Amino acid sequence: MRAFSLLATLAASATAALAATVQYDFSVEWIQANPDGDYDRELIGINGQWPPPPIKCNIHDRVIVNVTNNLGNEPTAIHFHGLFMNGTNAMDGPVGVTQCPVPPGSNIIYNFTVEQPGMYWYHSHFGGQYPDGLRAPFIVYDKDEPFAGQYDEDTYLTVSDYYHQSIPWLTANKFLTLINPTGAEPIPDAALFNDSQNIKFNVEPNKTYKIRIVNVGALVSQYIWFEDHDFKIVEVDGIYVEPTDASMLYITVAQRYTILLTTKNSTDQNYPMISSFDTDMLDKLPEDLVWNVTGWLTYDENAAFPEPALIDQYDFYDDFNLVPVEKELPYEPDYSITVDVSMQNLGNGVNYAFFDELSYVAPNVPTLYTVMSSGNDSTDATIYGSNTHTYVLGYQEVIEIVLNSKDPGKHPFHLHGHVFQVIERSEASPDDNSFLVYDPANPGTVNEYPMRRDTVYVRPNGYFVIRFKSDNPGVWFFHCHIEWHLAQGLALTLVEAPAEIQSKQVIPEDHYAACKAGGYAYEGNAAGNTVNLFDLKGEKLQPKPLPAGFTARGIVAMVFSCISAFVGMGFITWYGLSDLKTTEREVAEVMGESLDDSDASK
Ligand SMILES: [Cu+2]
């Protein structure tokens, strides 16, 4: 026993001695780029480059990311997707949850240690900003990985959907607007591999490649395969899994898969590698949309680069059946949260997304900052506001989230600060008008050692059940990772062990300075009230409900009859945003809703 503890001490100090500090200085800037070769636009890059550079470190390292916002016209913030930020909740990044927006000209430092191995990514968590380019891999090397020595090269591959127009423009003009009452998501213009197309992935024969794959897109899941090459899945979302044979992946936005792929022993041919949109997730398929992106496992530059073969069906590996290397039986829940997902129109005619009756609206004061300035009242969810949909969680409990979707879309949900066990995930409901609802009295098959990850999707009108341990005090966002749906409010807030946060964590001065520079409130309740934490006057709220009897279809009819009335009367010419605003106002007035009120509450 004595010898063991001595060894353990030696091992711990050796680890500490090896841990390094890795610093990145990031100037966030607009950069001219054209990744699909079809359209020049400005994208958000770093230090004069787009795509932004990957962050790389070893497990146990301290990482310092010093971010200066040189965009000039937009705030920003960076989230480190999948990292637990244990003890450093303020470094997590989501605006309104753990920090203020970093205004143009300001600076913020993210400083944290990394205790998880594998593939992650970092991305903007301000508004819908990351699909404008601010996203890249975050790679954590681990010399003790279970498949160490079983590969020759360690590399990565990003896949992404891609838009030609900026996200703020699309949001205002095409998405969160009266002329889109069904909430149809803007259709991407292209698919990208490593932020490019037609990439040549150079390989040598008879070698094994570790390929860390991440979907950094905004909306669509992708099917990924390498012609005539099977592979082994060895890690998902930072969790090592028993090596599992597969020939195709289905990867939602924000998910990661690390695979081992062994090359053939001859070099006479190159092989297409394909990433293909899950087109079920698109409202329509424009004729000119190319929803595949092709690259090639390139054995020989001088050999042919064949077109991909057509396939009959997408035969992908179902991640539900992956088995973590570190085995844990299903946790028994202490506290269960059940939420229903739906998409509905509110009184301003715009389509929003809901957990139950709430569409998330960010508070005036970031929720973590409310925790830090509320003393003993921090355990009362009321102070975090009416529209942040906050649950206060106890410390060291097992939390269960039951999510029943009453929406015919697929939604990839992400929990910050944790991985969770995926206890159950239903198939899609057989038809659009009925829902599968989880029945705890009649559970389905639960795997002996449930898969753990940080992002999981629910199938159309189906459900999932996830469980995690509340062992990481912090304010953690749970949300759909489709950026459009987050903009529609598909999010809720978990305030985990607030007394522990208060006693053990600090918000650094430079984070407060960003709030002050932008004129953002940084203390008190969700409304910014520091005197009476239960007075929420002035808090941000979702728009009022639609008057009874209105439907999305009715709004479409109303909008177009208003448009034709205006055009017919010759009062205005129908072009551009200003006229659209006029129409919105007219329609809103007919519906008895003041747009000014609802704008103020957005
Ligand atoms: Cu969604």
Image (spheres, rainbow, N blue to C red):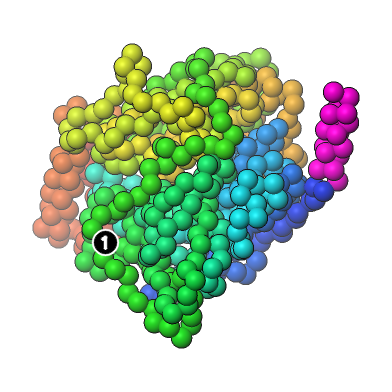
Main secondary structure type of the part rendered in magenta: helix
Residue plotted at (85% across, 34% down):
7
- Tell me the kind of residue under disc 1: Ile
Closer-to-camera residue (524/112): 112
The span shown in magenta is: 1-17
In the displayed structure image, the side of residue 305 where residue 351 appears, left or right: left
Residue 536 visible in the current orientation: no
Residue plotted at (17% across, 53% down):
563
Indicate if the residue with disc 1 has its beta carbon within 8 Å of ligand 1: no
Residue 224 visible in the current orientation: yes
In the displayed structure image, the side of residue 375 where residue 135 appears, left or right: left
Mark count: 1
Closer-to-camera residue (343/459): 459
The residue tagged with tag 1: helix, strand or loop? Answer: loop
Quadrant in the picture for the N terminus: top right
Residue plotted at (33% across, 64% down):
292
* Crowd rating for badge 1 (residues with CA inside 10 Å; few <14, some 14–19, many 20+): few
Residue plotted at (31% across, 17% down):
442
Q: Picture coordinates of residue 535 (x, y %)?
A: 53, 19
Q: Picture coordinates of residue 148 (x, y %)?
A: 65, 52
Q: Picture coordinates of residue 16 (x, y %)?
A: 83, 42
Quadrant in the picture for the C terminus: top left
Q: In this rendering, is residue 228 above or below 95?
A: below
Work out which residue is located at the far bottom of the displayed protein and give it: 302
Magenta includes 16?
yes
Mark 1 — residue?
A: 311
Q: Picture coordinates of residue 316 (x, y %)?
A: 35, 50
In the displayed structure image, the side of residue 233 where residue 590 appears, left or right: left
